[in-house]
Image (cartoon, grey):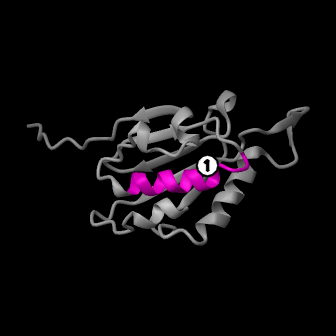
Amino acid sequence: MTTTANISSTNPSGIPHTLFVCTTCASVWQDGKRQGESGGQKLLQHLQQLAQNWNLRKEFPIQEVECMSACNRSCVVAFAAQGKLTYLFGDLATDGSASAVLECASQYYAKSDGLLPWLERPEPLKKGILAKIPPLVRSTKVEG
């Protein structure tokens, strides 16, 4: 992850960030029960292992999610922070995409609005965009 070294790990706004990882993705089911370890669980393990040396591990926690309802596009991750765009990425390889996910998460963290231009994203996250959701905006309008 040499490309993340140039990205500042400062968060002047103090906004909490979260990397969500679907652990149901790429599961094998038999008689309504999951068999063995899912692809999402494997991706989560790779992310957690790499995150041990990630400069943003404390500011950008990884949270497992039982299902993110993108089953036909697994494996799936999302980046979210208050006041920023939320991104949902799918079609991620169980092996080999964890480094790209953390690189892209670092880019997301460094942007005040969370905007991740297509050309700047790591290759595995260029093709797998499932959603770019606008940030929640708090209304300052006072009704009376």
> Residue at position x 52%, y 68% from top?
57
The residue lying furthest to the right in this view is 31
Q: Quadrant of residue 50?
A: bottom right
Q: Nearer the viewer, residue 31 or 96?
A: 96
Q: Secondary structure at mark 1?
A: strand
What residue does disc 1 label? 21
> Residue at position x 54%, y 68% from top?
54
> Residue at position x 51%, y 37% from top?
126
Q: Nearer the viewer, residue 134 or 43?
A: 43
Direction from residue 91 to residue 8 in the image, left or right: left
Q: Position of residue 27 (x, y in %)?
A: 79, 39
Q: Is residue 5 above or below residue 33?
A: below
Question: What secondary structure predominates along the stretch shown in magenta?
Answer: helix
Q: Position of residue 43 (x, y in %)?
A: 70, 51
Is residue 9 shown in magenta?
no
Q: Position of residue 142 (x, y in %)?
A: 11, 41
Q: Which residues are magenta?
A: 94-109
Q: Decide if residue 60 is in sight here.
A: no
Q: Nearer the viewer, residue 30 or 19?
A: 19
Q: Position of residue 46 (x, y in %)?
A: 69, 58
Q: Quadrant of residue 45?
A: bottom right
Q: Decide if residue 8 is in sight here.
A: yes
Direction from residue 15 to residue 140 in the image, left or right: left
Q: Quadrant of the C terminus?
A: top left
Direction from residue 59 to residue 28 in the image, left or right: right
Query: Label 1 sits on what residue type?
Result: Val
Is residue 104 shown in magenta?
yes
